[in-house]
Amino acid sequence: MGLESNANIKPPWWLKPMNKAFMVVMKVVPIKGPVVLTVPGRKSGEPRSTPITPFEVDGHRYVVGGFPNADWVRNVRAAGTGTVTQGRHHEQVRLVEVSADEARPLLRQFPILVPTGVGFMKSSGLVSGPHPDEFEALAGRCAVFRFDTV
């Protein structure tokens, strides 16, 4: 079960600067796994980019919002579409938030398919480790989006 309420979950101070540096590196050195998601800002309409790590289950791609109410999650909810970039490849996608019931089995697989995400979620107090039961319990707290091709 998650360790803290959503109100207490905050990303570490270094996450935004690290994300910016990581996106620069990803433009130069294609890395398998992470991609850059760009969506219009919900207030400004200006493009907002963040690195994410999608994973595949049964032929569909998904991404988990690692922090409840993260800015990029709120922007995706408002826009519904975005651009996924990996190296020089760009793809327009529709991002569909799945229900908590649909999210549960996906969240159980997350610590296995995206082990790099476990550390972030552990340090934020969402989970105590790579335990599928704890990740499943995040259904309804952490958004899970399915990528549909536009």
Image (tube, rainbow, N blue to C red):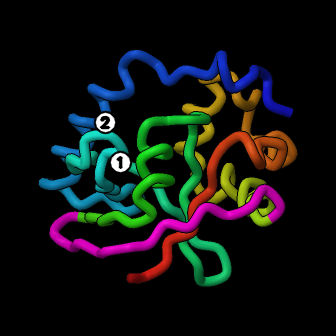
Q: CA distance from mark 2 to mark 1?
A: 6 Å
Q: Amino acid at mark 2?
A: Asn
Q: Name the residue: 40% across, 58% down.
A: 79
Q: Which mark is residue 149?
A: none
Residue 123 in percent (x, y) is at 60, 23
Residue 59 in percent (x, y) is at 60, 83
Q: Is residue 95 magenta?
A: yes
Report crowding for label 2: few under 14, some 14 to 19, many 20 or more residues within 10 A (C-alpha): some
Please tell me in which quadrant of the rendered image residue 85 appears.
bottom left
Q: Amino acid at mark 1?
A: Pro
Q: Is residue 104 magenta?
A: no
Tell me if residue 31 comes above or below residue 143 in the rendering.
below
Disc 2 on helix, strand or loop? helix
Report crowding for label 1: few under 14, some 14 to 19, many 20 or more residues within 10 A (C-alpha): many
Please tell me in which quadrant of the rendered image residue 58 appears.
bottom right
Work out whether mark 2 precedes mark 1 in sequence or the reverse, and give the earlier one.
2
Return the residue nearer the eye: 23 or 101. 101
Q: Name the residue: 34% across, 58% down.
A: 35
- 88 on left or right of 144: left
Residue stretch rendered in magenta on the structure: 87-101
**Residues tagged 2 and 1 counted as in contact (Cβ below 8 A):** yes
Quadrant position of the C terminus in the picture: bottom left
- 7 on left or right of 102: left
Return the residue nearer the eye: 83 or 20. 83
Residue 78 in percent (x, y) is at 45, 53
Label 1 sits on residue: 51
Disc 1 on helix, strand or loop? strand
Return the residue nearer the eye: 140 or 11. 140
Quadrant position of the N terminus in the picture: top right
Label 2 sits on residue: 19
